[in-house]
Image (cartoon, rainbow, N blue to C red):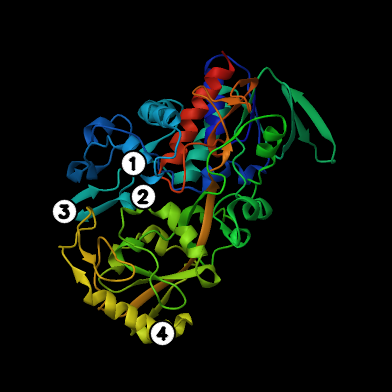
Amino acid sequence: MIVVGAGNAGMSAAFAARERGASVLVLEKAAREWAGGNSAFTAGAMRLEHGGLADLLDLVEGDERHAVTDLPPYTEFAADLERVTLGRGDPDMARVLVGDSAAALRWLKGRGVRFRLMYERQAYERDGRWTFWGGLAVGVVDGGRGLVDQQAAAARRFGIEVRHESPVEGLVPGGVLVRLPNGGFQELRARSIVLAAGGFESNPALRAGYLGPNWDVAKVRGTPFNTGEVLLEALEIGAAPYGNWSGCHAIQWDAGAPPTGDLELTNRFSRQSYPVGIVVNSRGERFIDEGKDFRNYTYAEYGAEVLRQPNGVAFQIFDQRSVPLLRGIDYDAPGSTRVEAGSLRELGEALRIDAERLERTVSDFNAAIVGGPFDPAVKDGLRAEGLAVPKSNWALALDTPPYVAFPVTCGITFTFGGLRVDGDARVLDLSGRPIPWLFACGELVGGLFFHNYPGGSGLTAGTVYGRRAGYAATA
């Protein structure tokens, strides 16, 4: 079997096929140091249904904080997926994802992937206890880079060959065309091919063509190598397109970050503590409901909202009551773009935005706050009412200087449109029939996510459908 792409989904397919006795060759476009695709640029979070902390103790590594942790059961994965995608996702695909989620993570653990509870990203400490929020608690030890490294080690143990700098630029029945360093091509044949080469988020022309104006100038949160040629090749040979081709996962990203992912900082340009502050554009105006829901259910859509603002930038604003609530692992990362000032006017001037409007925005916001008390671990109802853009929860007044701002832009993670597959990850043609030798998994597959995305679902989907692809490809 040949797997195209060495990210989490592709490696999951390789492990499953090897488990069934197949010989497996993984072809990776990138050099070894860039291996892992977008998986390496995530925080390693993986969403699964579970029965609470006791149900997860066999999956996650021990931690002395477990004794003072409140982690309720999470059985709303399907409902959350349907809610944030506005009911447009494929219900059969969703059932597979949710139904396999817990078993798939435990299966990964059996292949050497280590898991832990993500206290620093998904929990708040109060009164000596840790409370998890937003349905997401489990992540890979050492994040996305840890996932890639642990899977690479497993591949060596299981006798799976991974060839780097081997871009696939053509598909033929039962085979692939690989570009060689001298510019020529080599045809490699196998009984089955699994495509796991990601979407087209790193291709500016395809972004502009499918996502719309200005998407060609968005920053790329992850790998620069997901440029879509394998996806387009599959369409060329008759695979059916599926899903939300004008949609993507895009987050608020440090405005000073490089154009594509950074191998050292990976996910740490992420700016996801906006629910405890406000976000304004260069006119000094708010434009999103920062507290509409837990950040796990809004962050993947708010990057696009930032891109729609003047110059495609915005500014997260906090004061000294909210600064201690920021996720330090990201906001304190080396090179973070941070501006601090003793007054809102000085802050606006330092940011080169409309300082007078910023003062008025904050004044109106503070005066509109009702409800409470403040509790960042639940939807607390502390809200700002009567504004053009309300804030539904966590509406802390900004009144304790010095004030701190973080300039952000749009960081695209992955595209939602892709190939259509069935429950066994077989690629379907335009008539809905399986292409006998072709399978697909990961971000190259469409149909699961529309408009938005519940945090941690992508890596889980990669493993769920990767495992199914590997099993079906060796049947």
Residue 294 to residue 448: above or below: below
Cα distance in 3D space between marks 4 and 2? 31 Å
Circles 3 and 4, Cβ within 8 Å, touching? The answer is no
Cα distance in 3D space between marks 3 and 2? 27 Å
Q: Secondary structure at mark 3?
A: loop
Write the residue at 23% across / 64% down: 383
The residue wearing badge 3 is: 128
Cα distance in 3D space between marks 1 and 2? 8 Å
Q: Amino acid at mark 4?
A: Ala
Q: Secondary structure at mark 4?
A: helix
- The answer to whether any part of residue 18 appears in the image is no
Q: Which mark is residue 297?
A: 2
Q: Is 14 or 229 nearer to us in this picture?
A: 229
Cα distance in 3D space between marks 3 and 4? 40 Å
Residue 74 horizontal/vertical position (percent): 27, 37
The residue wearing badge 1 is: 80
Q: Of tags 3 and 2, which is closer to the observer?
A: 2
Quadrant (top left/top right/bottom left/bottom right) for the N terminus: top right
* Mark 2 nearby-residue class (10 Å; few <14, some 14–19, many ≥20): many
| Residue 130 in the figure: left or right of residue 316 | left
Q: Of tags 3 and 4, which is closer to the observer?
A: 4
Q: Amino acid at mark 2?
A: Tyr
Cα distance in 3D space between marks 1 and 3? 29 Å
| Residue 208 in the figure: left or right of residue 410 | right
The residue wearing badge 4 is: 355
| Displayed quadrant of residue 95 | top left
Q: Earlier in the sequence, mark 3 or mark 4?
A: 3
Circles 1 and 2, Cβ within 8 Å, touching? The answer is yes
* Mark 1 nearby-residue class (10 Å; few <14, some 14–19, many ≥20): some
Q: Earlier in the sequence, mark 1 or mark 3?
A: 1
Residue 472 horizontal/vertical position (percent): 55, 18
Q: Of tags 1 and 3, which is closer to the observer?
A: 1
